[in-house]
Amino acid sequence: MKHLLLFIFSLLTSTALFAQNIVVNGDLEDVNICVEHNALCSPAGWFYFKADPVGYLNPGSANKSISASGIHHFNLMAASAQDSSRDYWQTKLLCPVEPGKKYSISLKISATWADPNLNDLGFWFTNKFIYTSKDTLLQPNNYVGFLDAKVKSMKNGWFLINKEITVSDTASILVIGNFSKEKNSDLFAKRRRDIKSISIFVDDIQINCDKETACIIDSHIKDSLYAIKRRHSKIELIKPPTIETQKPLCQDSVLVKPNHVVDTFSINSIQFALDDSRITDKSVVKMLAPLSQKKDAIERMEVIGYTDDLGTEEHNWELSKNRAASVIKLLAEEIGIDPKIISARGEGISKKYEQKDLNRRVDIFIYWK
């Protein structure tokens, strides 16, 4: 009897694990308070493509009563007759989707002007966050559409959408938006001449593993996503003005000459894959590119990696070292800096800044001849 009870408990536990939603904050009810304005501006764990997030409806908005559940939902501008851009939101999955495995997708959608058109919404699985200061249009070839999904009518104009998919590639990032191959102008010219924009409301987003697929949830991912509070800052390298060293710096126990001129670059956390050492933002190469013209004047470079205080010290120590190593590889392969003049180390956890996302960084010190 004891063994039978243990078996039943194990079965129930496994079933619950398989059914667990791998989309962080899928109901959008956890709110991020942006540190720039000390105000609600986005759902925790989710990131808008541009520097100023829009389309997160909340109790202070005119549409506060129409959420499918709770009080928060997305309002995605799927297309506009005025320009070519569209709105997108993105997050990192609690565990990556894997090729050959089956997943069940469900979400709730609505629209103000008519019943929502399933042509206007899709999921795109990718492996890097996308950040831009400009309006964006994404039209990937391999996104998940919902024209063949099961649709169930709900109250207040909402519809429950269900679809099962088999993934072809490993991916850790989910992007939601309109990925239609048609131009915005064609969408309106052909079928919607009486309106100027298409908005889709989205709520209660779920991606569940198939019963035969084990999803190993990484709770550290949620903590890392929730710790990133900034939503209005431009995503770019911060390059302070050239400075004279104010105090001796140490490297390998050798003091830097007091009259050395040192330039400092800081590669911030958003330019890396979350909880990863890969550099995903190509603007890093663009910002460092001028160094290729001045490399003969560089005496040496020092690269130091840091993390925030989420996770274990051992994990963060390794991550900080790997991020520093990635920067050395970029400097050598993309910028043409001789790796012999570059030293790197990881310092693990940093508490220099009150905001955790500022502590997740790699600092580059350039010592000029």
Image (spheres, rainbow, N blue to C red):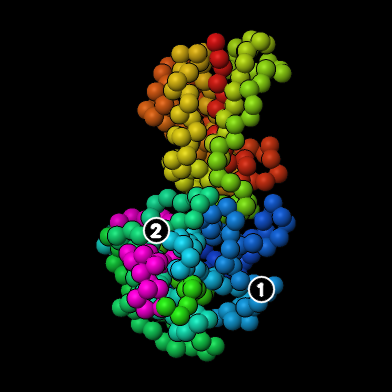
State the residue at coordinates (49%, 56%). Answer: 135
Q: Secondary structure at mark 1?
A: loop
Given residues 335 and 304, the one toward you in this image is: 335
State the residue at coordinates (54%, 88%). Answer: 156
Q: CA distance from mark 2 to mark 1?
A: 28 Å
Number of numbered discs on residues: 2
Would residue 57 be found to the left or right of residue 283 on screen?
right
- Give the x, y percent position of residue 237: 55, 37
Q: Which residues are magenta?
A: 169-192
The reply to whether the magenta stretch includes residue 176 is yes
Q: Amino acid at mark 2?
A: Leu
User: Which image quarter holds the N terminus?
Assistant: bottom left
Mark identifier at residue 143: none
Which residue lies under the disc numbered 2?
138
State the residue at coordinates (62%, 78%). Answer: 63
- Give the x, y percent position of residue 37: 71, 55
